[in-house]
Image (cartoon, rainbow, N blue to C red):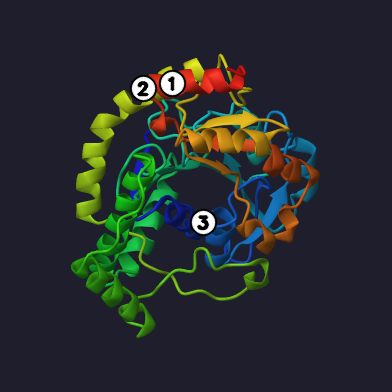
Amino acid sequence: MPKYKIYTSYARTAIYLALLSIGAKGKKVLLPAFICATTLPDAMVQAGGIPVFVDIDVHSLEMIQDDIKSKISSDTVAIISHHYYCAYMDYVVKIQDISKKYNLIHIEDRAHCYGLKKDLIGDAAIYSFSKNMISPGGGLIVTKDHKIWQECLSIQDKNKSIFHTFILNTEAFSYMEAIKNDRSCKGYKKWGLLKFIKMSASKLLKILGFYQKNYFYKITSNDIGKNFHIFDTRMTSEQLKYILIAIRKLRLAINTRKKVASRLNEILPSFLNVDNNIFTNYVIYSDELEKLEPIFGDLNIKTRRVWPYFQKYWHQQKTASVEELSKKLLLIDLDCFNEEKIGKLRGVLNGN
């Protein structure tokens, strides 16, 4: 079966465009409760959809099937499954079976999984080009459904802005610099004058209404049901050029991260250590994160908790499983590691 592709400005706009294409406005969309609140729920609400959170198993991170079935109603249009931290989740086959049984669209959120060689299971999947490589944003929709593909292209064609290329390139390449600094474990650089002028002009065009802005990072559960204007979701040619360069370097980066992860498996309580993992981050599950975080900090290894801040805007996400994971999971940046740091980490953890 042929697969169709649609390129987008970011992965979050890929989800948004995919939801628009299936007619999610006024409809319910099921998604995992354990998810970043600034992407999927934000995209759904701006597309006119109603997020319905499904609880997950705290050990496997699978959406609980009984909870899925109990929340499907006559106005449910889709289920979104999620692959966590570059680990391919086999349970999506079960989600596809449920989707077919209830005549729903199944969208796989593969934002972290570009470069993972696994066939499409759902009706569509979205990818990010910036989760596991350094690029100026960029997203991708892959679908087996010709109607979804046609509708996505039609929506993009009908909602073009003459300022889109300037604004997106300004913001996306600024984003790329931030990623580059973050993954090299260096501090952020101050803006130069030209960059300041471009960012200011971009902001002014939005304020004056010359460019239809999006509301990612600003949506809350109170915004469900509001009417949002459709915004331009296209990828620019400049983005695509840099992304194609980054893709050529991706396999080497994946192999390097796998080697580091293999070494860390010897000394850390790993989580999601499955065969199909290309390691955006190394994930650990521990009751002692408060003790571990300073150790990584002293070695200049970047870590972060899972989505702690924006969750407060979506009280529906607060299940016991999500609360436990938010307190016990830690994401570790593999790009900051070298043999010396691995050796020092081993020594500290062994009490040497």
Nearer to us in this view, 90 or 76: 90
Label 1 neighbourhood size at 10 Å, few (<14), some (14-19), many (20+)? some
Q: Which residue is mark 2?
A: 256
Look at the numbered disc 3 and give the secondary structure of its residue: helix
- In this figure, what is the number of numbered marks? 3
Q: Which of the two discs, 3 and 1, labels the residue nearer the N terminus? A: 3
Q: Amino acid at mark 1?
A: Val
Q: Is residue 37 left or right of residue 157?
A: right
- Depicted 259 relative to depicted 332: above or below: above
Q: Position of residue 7 (x, y in %)?
A: 33, 49
Nearer to us in this view, 252 or 163: 252
Q: Which mark is residue 260?
A: 1
Nearer to us in this view, 142 or 309: 309
- Depicted 283 relative to depicted 204: above or below: above
Question: What distance separates the C-alpha of mark 3 from that of mark 1?
Answer: 37 Å
Label 2 neighbourhood size at 10 Å, few (<14), some (14-19), many (20+)? some
Question: What distance separates the C-alpha of mark 2 from that of mark 1?
Answer: 6 Å
Look at the numbered disc 1 and give the secondary structure of its residue: helix
Q: Position of residue 293 (x, y in %)?
A: 59, 37
Look at the numbered disc 2 and give the secondary structure of its residue: helix
Q: Which mark is residue 19?
A: 3
Q: Residue at x 80, y 38 (%)?
A: 66
Question: What distance separates the C-alpha of mark 3 from that of mark 2?
Answer: 35 Å
